[in-house]
Structure formats: structure tokens, C-alpha cells
Amino acid sequence: MAILEDMTDLARRAKAASRQVARLTSVDRNRVLLSMADALQKATVELQVANALDREVGRAMGLSAAMLDRLTLDSARIIAMAQGVRDVATLPDPVNRVLDERIRPNGLRLRKIAVPIGVVVIIYESRPNVTADAASLCLKTGNATILRGGKEALNSNRLIASIMVSAARAVMANFPEDGILVVPTADREAIPALLSLTQYVDLCMPRGGEGLIRAVTACSKVPVIKHYKGVCHVYVQGDADLRMAEEIVFNAKCQRPSTCNAAETLLVDQTIADRFLPQIASRLATKDVSFHADIEAIPLLRSGLGDRGFQVQEANSEDWSTEYNDYVINVRIVKGLEEAIQHITDYGSGHSDAIITADETVAERFLSEVDSAAVYWNASTRFTDGGEFGMGAEIGISTDKIGARGPMGLEELCTYKWQGFGTGQIRS
Amino acid sequence: MAILEDMTDLARRAKAASRQVARLTSVDRNRVLLSMADALQKATVELQVANALDREVGRAMGLSAAMLDRLTLDSARIIAMAQGVRDVATLPDPVNRVLDERIRPNGLRLRKIAVPIGVVVIIYESRPNVTADAASLCLKTGNATILRGGKEALNSNRLIASIMVSAARAVMANFPEDGILVVPTADREAIPALLSLTQYVDLCMPRGGEGLIRAVTACSKVPVIKHYKGVCHVYVQGDADLRMAEEIVFNAKCQRPSTCNAAETLLVDQTIADRFLPQIASRLATKDVSFHADIEAIPLLRSGLGDRGFQVQEANSEDWSTEYNDYVINVRIVKGLEEAIQHITDYGSGHSDAIITADETVAERFLSEVDSAAVYWNASTRFTDGGEFGMGAEIGISTDKIGARGPMGLEELCTYKWQGFGTGQIRS
């Protein structure tokens, strides 16, 4: 009960602050962001002290070297974090955009405009720079934020938020103290408590591994926008330019395998499998990629691998829906478009899928029938990203269908309202 | 467990059907709708037989005369229901609208287009004509529907859905049998079971009383778009044209008090209360309206009511957040804009609120700071309606902020996806 009371107090304060943040002008929000950026950079020493405490905790918790590295705020990262906040200040303001406007026959003018959502909860894992990143994107869009990072980053996160709020108040005395809040406890029960408060919290965006996101979604009463994982496909259709297909598959798998928009499965039409599979196998072998393949594909892949044929194993049914985040790829031969779409429907995660083909009709069917957030014709799945989409910033990627879908930038941190301008209209 | 298995089977079939429905062209969907409309009208006798069975059940359940009337399908209502389906066919197609388009520096063309959501569950109360209405709006937007009406309308609802699907298949053999499904049981456990199936169900829209909607929302794992109630306000500011204010308040309260966009509370600036309250009281008295008022307002209202002063009672704290759906209105005197906004923030339902004023600056602040789906300046709250907004049709009204907000028409029954058109682009 104590934790529920604490979270209720926190969320109520955030809600009150959200109304004040929403009232700030665009100029004010940008001025505040620049002040925050400068303050973060000036506080390098304090941030490193707080971060050292966190790393001590992390080491005591037995975090891996990779996790400890993610947790670390060195001065280069602090500069980059501050620069990120500055970059947000320079982006166009998405708030108050007119999304629709109509004058009704009775003269009533209706305007649909983008407005802040209110209170946004962001839940994430280790990296403390996400704190500044998420808070600045929410502030830019007129939202209050409640941040919940990893427990091993609590000191860093609290200090970052407190520096940001102080810097805001230094240039704008009425900036609300509760405009950026960090959940002040590592208690696991804080999350379900916070996410039960639909009267105060408008949206939750969890970022991290599938386990975290499933746990958040399972307990939340508040709308959650998220993606669980990215099981992305590249389908090389019978009419594909095989040089182009090779480049795209290689890029989609190998350019950065740890990302959610990297390809996990290659689907190849049977008519070209005997040509394309040896070719792509030998290309992927340059990055030491392993293959989980169906029975028919195995000898074709091995013929391209020569004495590295041991890199190929038979795929099991779980493989098709696995996000490897690694130099591993599933390979399956399909009879054509129908079977490719069916495979993606059965095993995909609704994230990003691509077709490589010279046949426009086939491509249009793929783009229309594959029910994913982003679908590509003759391009890499790796483009599903706020920056690559020209959004300027990204708070996450959604595979949901209600609210934002695909990369989420500033516009996706807004909702809308309808404003009616009348001259005394009444309904008859 | 049996009910979960049954609902899983139902939802899985709906999901498969949704892919087929989504593939239909706009021309096909409209052709199917017209065939459905004709078939419903031709089946007047069968529909009345099924409906008579339902009314017998309803009487046995002890439904009120008003509820039995809502349940009744007479031939005029069947004609109107068929005409409603025809009207949907004539509306513009919201699917495949291009919502955004951009060409990136690397030549990749990105297009954001409206697409069907997938499987939409509609939960509603007595009136069986909602079945045809909801199913036709979902079909128009390329969605499959699972319908759950009141248990007293089960025979009517099943027959309506079955007539619609048969009529579709008569003109289009490959129309999926499961494109429109009615939950075939009155078992209350069907709803939580169905709404646990996030892998098959994309959205739930409950329509009805607050109790129903809260129960649905509490149990659902699927996104729910809804409004609980409409506690709408009209704020008559000190610079209002009081003739206009009188007309708007009268309209907002009395034109149809049973609707969610009718006003429940009148807020009046203290500077004009002694003039406006007697005036509005005497006007509202023509409809025998009762008043729940704050202490200061009571004598002013009574002075306008003469010997009907007994119609005024002191408001209690619950009244301010009550949706009366009746000829009853709360009245409160406020010190100005700030207090009016604070009252709406504290007691409103985020539905529809209006300000009456000649002062543009004040109006702009109200329109900006009142955090409701629809906000009006010098117009009645009664305009929050798909038809009045020019949407052509309405599936409901939302006070949510994620997904649709305000009246929901065909566009709000779509989600979007991103399509990328490349010429071999890879990410560097």
C-alpha cells in the first residue's frame, strides 16, 4: 500500500505539472531545453561521481562488462547527451499543428490540432543517457515525464533529471518542479502501482528486452505503446535482381545485427534458390554468419560455403520466430508470394519486412498484404528508424496498431483535440 | 476453459477473415454492402420472427418498456437499418489514403497510408440495429468484426450477421464467412476470454453505460477505445453575449438530454451571475429543468423561477461529476477563467466543453487549456458527433488520447503502415 500511495503522489504531481508544461510556448520549451543541455555538460564531474556509485552497485549486482559499459557516463557520453538535448531544441515544434480543418454548413469551424498527451511514463533499461533523451523529447512535445530506468542507474538518472529541472527553473521560474520525475525507488512493485493510475498517467512506453516489455504490458492499465521484438524478413522473389538482393540481405543482417530492424529470416523463391542461396551464403560467410535453414536450403547454402558448411544447421520451429540479435539467419525456400506472406504472417513480429523483386504487381501485393509497421520494396529493413525516416528524433518503435505504428518521433508524442469556433451555433 | 477455447476459435477465424476482408477492393466492399442492405430489407419477416423471440426473452428477464422498445425491430426500423448500410456504401473510402509521403536523401520513397486495423470487437447493449451499423462500418474500412450485443438481442443479432454474410457471398463467392461474427453465447465469461486474445483481436470498442464500459476496460488486454460518460460544461464568461449564452445553454442541456454531449454543468462568471442566472433559469424552466446549484447561485436562480423556486437544490460534491442524462443541470458561480478551467479539470470527463465569450484571448486559453476531446467557443457541446463533424458516420465517441479522440468515423477505424519504395537502398 505504501508504494501505491507513493506512486499516486508522484503521478498526481506529474499530472499537475503536465498542465503547466503544456502551457509553455514553443520558444519557452526550446529555451528551457538549451539551458538543460548546458547544465548537463557543466555538471560533468557531479554526473561522473553519481555514475561511479551506480557502477559500484552494478558490479556488486554482478553486471556483465557489456552492461557496465552501457551504464557508464564518461565525459564524451555526457557531451553527446547534452548535444542530443540541444538537437531536440532545434527540431520543428509538433504541438499545435493543424491536422484537419473544416467549416460546416452551419458556419461552425472545426479544427483538429496536435496537443500534448499529458503524462508519459518511460520505462527502460541500463543506459542513463536515455533519461535525458526521453525527458527532452517529452518536454519538446509539452508532456510531463515519469522516468523509470534500471535500478543500477538510479543515482545517475535522478541527478540527470534534477539537473534538467533546475536548469529549466533557472531560465523560467514557473517551470514545474514535477515536469520531469524519476521513480525514486528500485522497488519492482512501483511499476504496476504507477501503471494502475489511469486518472493521472496517459501513456507508457517501455523500451528494452522482450521480458521487460511483456511484464510492463501485462500489468498496465494505462495504454502501452511498444514492440516486443523484431523478427524481420527479407523475401527474395523469383524476379529479383540477385546482385541487389545480395546487397540488401547482407545489409539487413550484418550492418548492425543487434537492432530490432535487422533481418532474422531470408525467404527465397524456389525458382532462384539454386542460384541465390550459394551466392548469399558465401557473402554472409564474410561476416561469419550461421544459418538455420530448411532441409531443401541446406545443400544449396553449403555449396556456397565450401569448407565452412558446418555453419549450416536445420532450423527448428522456434527458430522462425526468434530474434537472434546476432550473426545468425534463418533461411527458407518458398513456392512464391503466397507462401512468403503466410510465413511472415505466422512467424513475423509485425515490425519490418522487405521484398526484393523487379515485378511491381508482386511488390504491391507484398506491401499491401504484409501486416507490418514498415514494409519495403527493394530496400533494407534497417531503415525503420526515426532518423532514417526524417523524424529528427526517435523515442521508440511501435508494432502496435492503436496510436503510433512504426518509428515514433515528436509527432507520435502528441495526441489531438477538436476545437470548434462558433458564432452562436446550436444543434437543431 | 471451454469458453476460452471457443473464443480462441472465434477470434482466430476472425483474424484469418480479416486478411481476406482487407484484400477486397473499395468497389468490392461497396458492392457487398449494397447487397447486404437489400438482403436485410428483404428479410423483414424473418427478422421480425427472430426479434419476437428476443422480446419474449426480454419480457421474461423483466426488461422495462423502454428497453423492450429499444430491442424492437419493426419494419420501419429494418428499412432504416438497411438504408444505413446503403449510406455507408456511398461514403468515401478511407482505406489507402496517403497520410504522408517523403523522399529521403538516399532516394528511398516513404509513404504512410491508412490501412484496416484487423479484428475489431464491438460490445454494445440492447438495440439490434447497432449490429448492422457496426458491421457495415467495419467492413467499409476493411476490418473483420466480432459483435457482442445484449443477451436479450442474441437471436436478432445472429440473424442480422448471417443475412449480411450470406448476401456478401451471393455477390462475391470469396467473401469470408467469418468476416462478421456474433459471439454465439450470452455467457458473461466470453468477454474477458475474447479480450485476452491480443494475438487475434486488435481493438475493442464498447458502447453503452458506464458500468458496461468499465467492466470491459478492466478485463481487457486488448486496446479499448471508449468514453465512460459525458460530463460536459458550458462556461458563460463575463464578456459573453447573454442572448447567445442563453440559446447555447438551453440547446446544450435540453435539445436531447440523454446524449453524452449534452451539458451537465453551467459555470457562470460572478460578474454576470446576477443578470444571467435569473435569465437562464426562466428559460430552462420552460423545459421543467431542475437545478443543483452552489449556495451563491441558488437565490439568483430562484429569482428567475418565481413560484417554481423549489426546482433548485444545493449541489453536493458528487453532483459535479454526475452525468444526469436528464432535465437536470448543475450551476456554479466562478471567479473567472482559471476557476472555470480548474472546475472542468476536477470534475469533467474530457468529452466536450464550451466557453461563451466575446473575448478572443480568453477563448483561446479555454480552447487550449481545457483538456477535452472537443472544446467549443460560442457553440453548443451537442456538436460532438460524427454526423455533425461531417464524418458521414459514427462508430462512437472517444475520450481517450491514444488512438482516436472525439467522434470516431471511418478514418478512425483505420490504422496506418509505412511503405518504403527503394531501388536497392541499404543503410550505411
Image: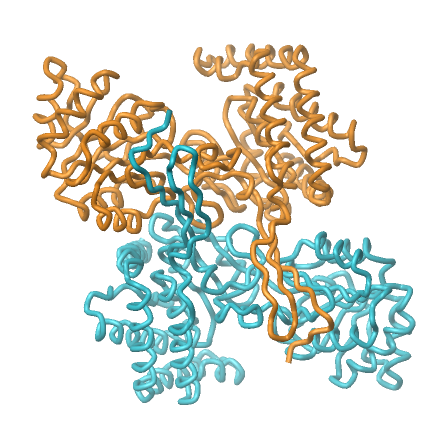
Chain colours: A orange, B cyan
Q: Is residue A377 left or right of residue B411?
A: left
- Residue A360 visible in the displayed image: yes
Q: In the rendered picture of this protein, how many numbered marks are placed on residues?
A: 0
Is B208 displayed left or right of B198 in the figure? right
Could you say which quadrant of the image residue B243 lies in? bottom right
The picture places residue A18, in percent across and down from the top left corner, at: 68, 42
Query: What percent of the width, then of the height, locates residue A307?
Result: 10, 13
Q: Give the answer, above or below, for where A302 lies relative to A381.
A: above
Q: Is residue B128 visible?
A: no
Q: Is residue B287 above or below residue B294?
A: below
Residue drawn at the location 82% of the way across and 73% of the way down = B313
Q: Give whichever of B290, A364 is nearer the camera.
A: A364
What is the quadrant of the C terminus of chain B in the image? top left
**Position above or below: B266 against A246:** below
Percent of width and height locating residue B420: 36, 42
Name the quadrant containing residue A80.
Answer: top right
Query: Could you tell me which residue is drawn at 54 percent across and 14 percent down?
Result: A72
- Judging depth in this view, the residue of A288 and B57 nearest the camera is A288
Residue at 17 percent across and 34 percent down: it is A332
Where does residue B91 sit, x and y in percent of width and height?
A: 42, 71
Q: Quadrant of residue A279?
A: top left
Q: Is residue B239 above or below residue A19?
A: below
